[in-house]
Amino acid sequence: MPHFQIHQFNCLQDNFGVLVHNEDDGTTLAIDVPEAGPVLEALSAKGWTLSDILITHHHADHVQGVAEVKEKTGARVYAPAQSATRIGSVDTAVQDGEAFQIGEISILPIATPGHTLDQISYYLPQANVAFTGDTLFALGCGRIFEGDAGMMWSSLERLVRELPSDTTIYCGHEYTLANAKFAVTVDPENQALRARLQEITQLRSADAPTLPTTMALELETNPFLRPQDPAVQKALDMTGAAPQAVFAEIRRRKDNF
């Protein structure tokens, strides 16, 4: 079983870069490359040599540093097959559900479209960690640009179904405080959510990250994962409505929050 170190760091305005390092064989993965400088600086600070890059989706704020980092490190690039040619610098096109190995690291790609049509989340079962890009956020979900509400809800349902509740979740952005302020408007009686809002407020006041999160914590407090909850439905005046319809209403309200 590989021994992992995971290093998260800031990129751009509110993106995260993440490095995953296997201490046993030296394999080091980068999850997305929002910009080259911080990734190269993090590698240097850690003394790690980048071997591979995993891309979640084609948006520029996740891929614009790929070419430079690949040129300077020789790393191989894995990206969703649906957008591999669009992204450029890609060595291997990744397909939904087709697990692959990088060194000793097992990686399961899970298609989670909605934010974009090509979005893939990556689950590393040996580390019990998932990288959900812009699909699942702490206390939120990605804005729907290329898919629709039904597609996004299906993607979130799939993550809930396929990831163990104790999975550690890394997301693409530091959006948690804004998400928390919205979440209490559609789940006002959730005491765990209110306590989490206080904790998040303190973290952000100290300029500390709110990620990673866990699937269990999201299931308890993230309204986008709980449209079937009677309390959420009551707050939206949608008691008895289908979860997909409730989810769509939550997403609509967040878009206008």
Image: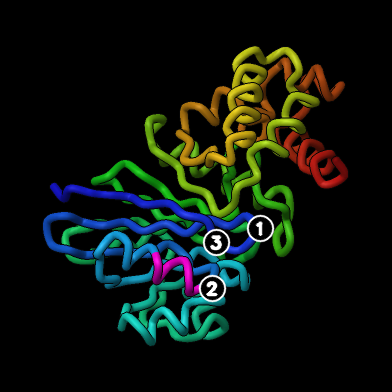
Note whether 60 is above or below 197 in the view shown: below
Image coords of residue 70 (percent x, y)? 38, 82
In this rendering, position of residue 4 left or right of residue 193: left
**66 relative to 193, above or below:** below
Q: Which mark is residue 63?
A: 2
Q: Is residue 225 magenta?
A: no
User: Three-letter amino acid code at disc 2?
Assistant: Val
The first of marks 1 and 2 along the sequence is 2
84 lies left or right of 237: left
Pick whichever, 56 or 50, lies toward us: 50
Rendered image quadrant of residue 100: bottom left
The answer to whether mark 1 and mark 2 are in CB contact below 8 A is no
**Pointer 1 and pointer 3: residues touching (CB < 8 Å)?**
no
Residue type pointed to by label 1? His
Identify which residue, 147 or 179, lies in the foreground: 179
Q: Residue at x 73, y 49 (%)?
A: 149
The amino acid sitting under disc 3 is Cys
Q: Is residue 112 visible?
A: no
Front position among marks 2 and 3:
3
> Crowdedness of circle 3 by 10 Å Cα count: few (<14), some, many (20+)?
many
1 or 3: tag closer to the N-terminus: 3
Mark seen at residue 115: 1
Magenta span: 36-41
- Residue to which mark 3 is pinned: 11
Task: Residue at 47% x, 78% y: name it.
Answer: 66
Magenta stretch, overall SS: helix
Q: CA distance from mark 1 to mark 2?
A: 15 Å
Judge depth for marks 1 and 3 and give the one in front: 3
The residue under the point 36% across, 58% down is: 19
